[in-house]
Each structure stands twice: as structure tokens, then as C-alpha cells.
Image: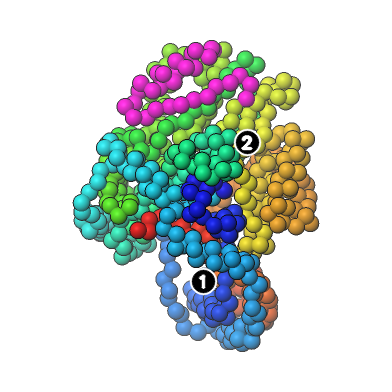
Amino acid sequence: MLKYSPLKKIKEDEILLLSKGLKYIPSPSTKFAKSSIASDFNEFARKLRCKYHFDKGDIFKRHPFLTKSGYKPELANNAIETYIFKTKVEIDNITINKAHDNLTTLERKAISSLKRNEKIVIRKADKNNTTVIWDKTEYINEGLRQLSSATHFMEIANLNIIETNQKINTIIFEMHRKGVMDEITFKYLSAKRDLKPGRLYLLPKLHKLDPELIESVQQNPTLYKNVRIQGRPIVSLSGTVLERIGQYLDKFMLPAVLKQETHLRDSLEFINIIEKLQVKPDAYLVSFDIKEMYNNMSHVEMIDAVKHAWPTIIKCKHTILLPPLRYILELLKIVLENNEFMFNGKFYKTSTGVPMGNSLSPEITDLRVYEVLNSILRTFQHKQKISSLYRFRDDGFFIYNEGTDDEISQFFEHANRQHALLKFTHEKSQTKMQFLDVLVFKGLRFRETGILDLTTFRKKTENYQYLERSSCHPSSTFRGIIKGEMLRFKRCTNDPVDLQTQYALFSERLIKRGYPKNEIKTVMQEVTAKQRIDTLMVKPKSVLQSPPLVFSTVFSRQKSHIKNNILKHWDKLKDDEEAKLLFDKRPLFAFRRHKNLKDIVTSATLNN
């Protein structure tokens, strides 16, 4: 955790609390636990009755914008209603014991004092799990510094949200009337929306700082004034008039982006490419970053990029009805030109670029950057020496063959002359290069086969703040953390000896966060039994499926036995021919979470 704030503003108990991580969930009150279970079972009973009345056994593709209807059907048959009645009796007889608090009295007080502290802003660091305590004045100054750019933002006296909402409704009502928007999508997009602006907040870019400087601040917090942390601007559009329209447009942009030959879905796809790629001994490994990609494209060029991509978009398979291009462009223009948001009590809008926080932002910028990169490559005099160029958002990688250090520098000088705002930074090496969470290098395997070696890359600013084991999460969550990380190490690392070292270090860090050795060992045995090649396989997603029956409730350790209560009379359904066909499988159990520390002590809106 980095305390970028005067020490006197933060108490030791507050620091100990936040060191648990912002995903940490304090033990909830059990006061309404029983009524919560009863309410959740009533919803489950509604699902049973709906399935009885409407399930014809069809397997279908679930609509992406399908929302709960809340419809309450009539009673089901005798067997199902008997099950519902008996299970309600079981729930009524449940005894909820008092919860063991996973926080001390002082830590509970720390929650209250942090919520009242108007001198600080608490944020998770950008690109890692470090919790940053940011001096509020410095936070506001960083936000205002970015908003002072006349190229990217403008301050506005009045919000235009009502007019924006009316424009959106006019278009979607016309689309529905003309049959180019289906009923489910129309209901989703035309649902009543809050007429409120977005909220700008900043994520501290610790990875841009010198690790030694961070360490010195951690040891001596009074040095915080020597550090200026840059913030990644995010505009939260949750609940705004632009949120759902952005989701709708994104459904048509994403398939076109996935067809770009240079596009990467994730690091797994990159690893699979490297595993099959033979590289020459003297080749350069090059990575690049597109600076402030989201903020540095004009609205006109992003709209034009969609026009240019339209032939590709038409050929793609879509999960919803594809409307004519003119409707796409009209809605896109509204989304881009009406990004209104609030920061520190004032209103602003974007004049260039698209803010992170909009579902559409990654795809719309990907379409334009693809054009820019193609133009750069097409006009570079040594383009034949560039191979295996891939990009994930604003991060890129390529191999430079039979060339020189100067030629690579010339390439990026050329690239930085092609666009008024988009600029590139880069790193190059003939031995090793970091890209995403992977470090590729010329090691033993490379010397023997010409295929680059791989290992897991960790930023020097990473503090390994894994979710503390005492957090009020299901045990499956902690097993998932262990398994997920170990599988990631296995995918990212081709040397078995290196992999074992990573497992050992990871285990030590987990033990420090309260994880039992036996739990770690059990999961490790499961992961080590898998062949690495199996972890590199991409599992196809089935789009045709019958929706599972799920009992969902908020998790607490006092509810750990609820599964037994729900299933106690379940098998009695098999005695009825009709119910046996409908409910041939036991229901799935899913836990919703209580509020975590992030929900409790952070907010996208500044408290004044």
C-alpha cells in the first residue's frame, strides 16, 4: 500500500484495514440473514413455477439484452408446490448463529473514520492491486491538470442530458417501428434512465513510477510531496443515458475488431502464437505503447473508421439484429459528442477521444488504431523486416528481422509523424522483452529450437496484495484465486524448474495472507497434474444452451448449510413424471457478495 498523503491524516488501524485489500469483505450483520434467505427462496420458487408453465425443452441462444420480467406465474403442479412448501418450512426452522467478526473493534472504527476523512481519496492502483491513499488536494489537482487540456475537454455550464435522452429515444423508437430493432433490445434500450452525468475518477499509475521512489515513500511517508502520481481518467457511466447505448453499439463493433489480423484477445492468444513462432538469432524483440490512446482521436475519425469497417461488420455474425449503417452512425455520434461528466462539483464534456468507462471505448478506438497502424506499416521503407505484429489495446509487439537498432528508431519516428495526437513509445532488445504479463526471451529453448522462451512477468511495483483469507467469501473463491494464478504461471512459463520456483514464491505470499498450507497444496496438486499444453487450449463457448436453474443468495458463513436445506426434499420431485422431466438436474448454487471495502470507503464522486 502506498500512502501518498501526510501521515497525520491516516491512523495505523486504518492502514492495517486497507492492507487487507479493497476486495476484502467484512463480516456482515446477521440481523436480516433469515429474511434474506426467505426472499431468495421466493425468487427461486418463482423460477420453478415459470419453468413448469413455459419450459418446452427448447435449447436456444440467450438474448444479450434479456432482463428479468418479474412475472409471477400461477401455482405449479402438486409435486412442485409440495417441494416449495416443505422447503419453506425448512428455511423457517433455520437457526442463524451470531457471526464471528473478521475485523477487530479498532478496524471497525477505522472503517467509520476512513468514510469521514475528507482529506484523502482511496483508490486501487491502475494495473495492480496496490491500495493507494491519495491526498485529496493532490488528487483534485491531477484531475484538473488533465481537464485543463482544451484539446480533450471543455467545461460546461449546463448539462444537455435531457436533450441527449430525447435524441436517443427518437432514434430507437424509429428503429423499432421500422423493424430494424427487436423487441427485447428495444425494451432494454428504452427503459427509463437516470438523467445524471457520468462521474470522472482517477486510478493512480504506480507502474509509471520508479520502484525505488515508491519504496522510499513507503518507508518515509513524509516524502510523498516529492512524488506526482499520474492518474488514468475513467468516466463511470453506470446508470447514465449513454450506458446501454454504448453496450448496444459495442455488440456490432466487437466482431469486426476480432477479425483484425493484428488483434489479440488476451495474453493466452499471444502465448499460443509465440509457441509456434521460430525467430532468427539476431532478431529484435520490440514492444510499443500508444500514449493516451482513448483520448487522442477525434470523433470524426472514429465515426469514419466505423464507415470503413462496415463491409467487415456486415459479414460478421451478430447476436442481435444488425440495423442499417445510418442508425449506427447517428447513435455513435450522440455517444461520442455527449460524454458529459462531473468532477469536483463542476461539469465537463469530452471534445476529443472517448473516455474509458464506456463499453464502446475499446472497440471504437481499436477500429481506428488498426487503420493508423496499417498506414504506418504500408509507408515504412523497411516494412518487410517487421513480422508477427500484434496488439492488445494500446500495447503492441513485433519482431524486427535482419535490421538495426537505428531502423527501429526510424520506424517509430515515422509512426509519430502520421497522426496529430497519437504517439508511440517503444522498447527494443535482442535478448528479452516484456509484453502484457509475459516475458519473452532467448533462453535454452530458443537456442535449441529457435522458439522464444517464456516466463511470467511481474511489475516491480507489484505488492502481491492477494485477497486476505479471512475475508467473508466462499471457500471456492479462495481456491479459485490459487488455481487461477497457478494456471497463469503454467501458461506463461515453459521451463519446469522456473515454474516450480514461481509456485514456491506464490505459496509463501499466500501463507502471509492467511491461506492454509493444506489448501494451497491440494490446489497445487490439481494444477501440476495438468499438462501445460492443455492449459493453452481455448475452450469454445456454447451459445446454444438451456438456462440453468440457479438458487442465488448473499453469502455468509452462517448460510453455508443452506444448500442442504434447499436440496433436502429435491429428490421427491423424481416421484412425479412431469417434474422429473423438468428438473432432471439439481439446481446450481451461486453466492452474491456483501459490500467490500471498495464499496464502503471509495466512491467515483468526490465528497465535498
- Sequence-wise, which precedes: disc 2 or disc 1? 1
Q: Quadrant of residue 153?
A: top left
Q: What residue is at 34 percent from the left and 40 percent from the top?
A: 145
Q: Callout 1: 10 Å neighbours few (<14), some, many (20+)?
A: few
Would residue 523 appear left or right of 254 to someone viewing this image? right
Check residue 249 for magenta coloring.
Answer: no
Gap between marks 2 and 1 measured at Cα: 49 Å
Question: Whole-percent x and y of residue 100?
Answer: 66, 72
Above or below, 273 against 80 in this view is above
Q: What residue is at 41 percent from the left and 25 percent from the top?
A: 374
Nearer to me, 353 or 333: 353
What amino acid does circle 2 point to? Phe
Residue labelled with disc 1: 55
Secondary element type, mark 1: loop
Question: Whole-percent x and y of residue 260?
Answer: 46, 34
> Which residues are drawn in magenta?
403-432
Residue labelled with disc 2: 457
Check residue 407 for magenta coloring.
Answer: yes
What amino acid does circle 1 point to? Asp
Question: Whole-percent x and y of residue 245?
Answer: 34, 53
Would residue 258 appear left or right of 488 to someone viewing this image? left
Nearer to me, 98 or 320: 98
Question: Whole-percent x and y of residue 404?
Answer: 53, 12
Q: What residue is at 55 percent from the left and 36 percent from the top?
A: 213
Q: Is residue 152 visible?
A: yes
Q: Is residue 45 visible?
A: no
Secondary element type, mark 2: loop
